[in-house]
Amino acid sequence: MTQTSKTRLTHPLFGPSAWRTLRFRFAFWVGSLLLVTQLIMGAFVYVRLQSRLLDTVDDSLRLNAVQIRAVVEAQEGMIAAPDSTDYSSLSADLQEQSLTARILSPQGEILQAFGIYRDISVNPSVIETVQRHRERLLTIADPNEIDENLRIFAVPILHQGELVGIVEVTQTLDSVNDTLEQLLVLFQLGVPVSVVIAALGGYELASRALSRVDRITAMAHRISAENLSARLDLPATNDEVGRLATMFDLMLDRLDASFQRERQFTADASHELRTPLAATRTILDTIRSRRRTVEEYEHALDDLADETIRLQNLVADLLHLARNDTAVTSTLEVIDLSALLQDITESLRPLAESKGLRFLSTVADGLSIVGDRDQLIRLFVNLLDNAIKFTDTGEIRIGGETGPKNLLKITVADTGRGISAEHLSHIFDRFYRIDRSRTTVGTGLGLALALSIARAHGGTIKVESDVGKGSEFIVWLYVDSLRS
Ligand code: ADP
């Protein structure tokens, strides 16, 4: 079983390293954040509600205590004995609100009491506080019911600054506790459910987004130099993953094209290298098949020298081309291009004149460029060499001037055989030669090399040609390709 199919069989949620997957971590974070937020919110709501409910209870206790005190005080400090005072209207009111009210003596004896908690023992802290003429509010455990609380409010009854009695009102807090308990139950159910839903939703969302990333990973796993034709072809979406997928496909396109070019180049190079080697072999076999005359040996040696030169040129061009592809313009300097072109022209003039060709130069003075001297020499020597090679009568003209936008324009024109339209678009291809017979010297790499040098200098080469009339190669170069 391959690594890929193994990976696919293990569901990421249950795999041994599930927690390391992005989708799991995303879900975990969504769930955790929601949990923390809900706990903080829940605690806040709980505390606020508890204090509001207690406030309501306290308000009602205070109101009732003050009302009872008003009734008692109206009797001018005389705390009535049981049934001598008419508390009946109050009693009905209190029962309706399920309140317990008691009137105590300053020492804490129960004088009057209504409601279900009328018999509970008097809390000493109530007496202690009220004896200091202060109100007292406290919560105690309900003696009748486990886990329930009572809220007690006590006020002093004063007559002429003297404590004559105590009004104590009591209410159970079970309704408050019930409400708070219901809220807790709601939280206990709601929080886990919403956290689980959010985490699952987060996991699903992340899975959807990342399934495309998984496809890219699987594709990257499958791709090798031999198989660059596969593409993701995911539906184009303008999100992060969509753009990644599109860029991935475009990168594969470029890699594919570049690998194909390299393969073609290697095939062409070996083919071209084979030809002079085969010719050398044939010459050697023929000459060694029997004894030869001195003239025949001399002739064979000349042929061998030709083939060796051809091989030497080819290897040199291949090397330059390979170097130019990788280390572009490695040694840059400011070059006086006018002087450089002058030197090249002068060194090639004898070759042109030996063929009876005129050599004219109209290069303007003071053209300068930041570039690689050796490469620029190679570029113009190649163009001029071709012009001389493919021209039988007439003239070769070399011109140079400044062009627009920091460009220099150098032209190499001849009155030679010209290039037909069908070949014009191919002459810059590597190994492309119009006349492939072995009588014309050349490797077909000269123009490819010239173009790659021009490009490395931020420029290009254009060509115009008329069959039978001549050709003009126009080289554009940036004055400073580094700053362009
Ligand atoms: P090579 O000169 O080594 O054959 P190049 O790449 O320099 O290779 O040129 C490719 C082909 O373009 C040449 O074989 C030739 O047929 C054609 N060519 C180049 N320059 C000229 C020119 N000035 N006049 C006519 N044909 C040319």
Image (cartoon, helix red, strand yellow):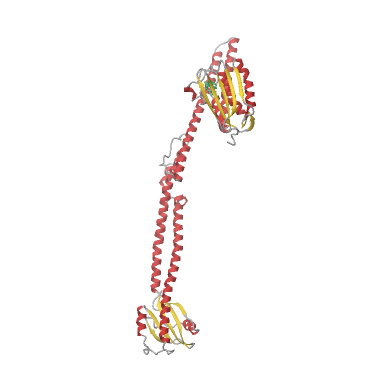
In the rendered image, the vertical position of residue 60 relative to residue 449, given as above or below: below
Judging depth in this view, the residue of 404 and 438 nearest the camera is 404
Relative to 309, is 175 on the left or the right?
A: left
- The x, y position of residue 40, in whole percent, is 46, 63
Judging depth in this view, the residue of 204 and 393 nearest the camera is 393
Q: Toward which corner of the image does residue 345 lie, by quadrant? A: top right
Q: Toward which corner of the image does residue 450 lie, by quadrant? A: top right
Q: Is residue 241 visible?
A: yes
- The x, y position of residue 105, in whole percent, is 44, 87
Residue at x 49%, y 30% (from the top left corner): 261
Q: Quadrant of the C terminus?
A: top right
Q: Quadrant of the N terminus?
A: top left
- The x, y position of residue 238, in whole percent, is 44, 44
In the rendered image, the vertical position of residue 434 relative to residue 373, given as above or below: above
Q: Toward which corner of the image does residue 315 lie, by quadrant? A: top right
Q: Is residue 225 visible?
A: no
- The x, y position of residue 308, in whole percent, is 58, 20
In the rendered image, the vertical position of residue 394 relative to residue 157, given as above or below: above
Relative to 452, is 38 on the left or the right?
A: left
Relative to 449, is 122 on the left or the right?
A: left
Judging depth in this view, the residue of 292 and 448 nearest the camera is 448
User: How many discs mark residues in the rendered view?
Assistant: 0
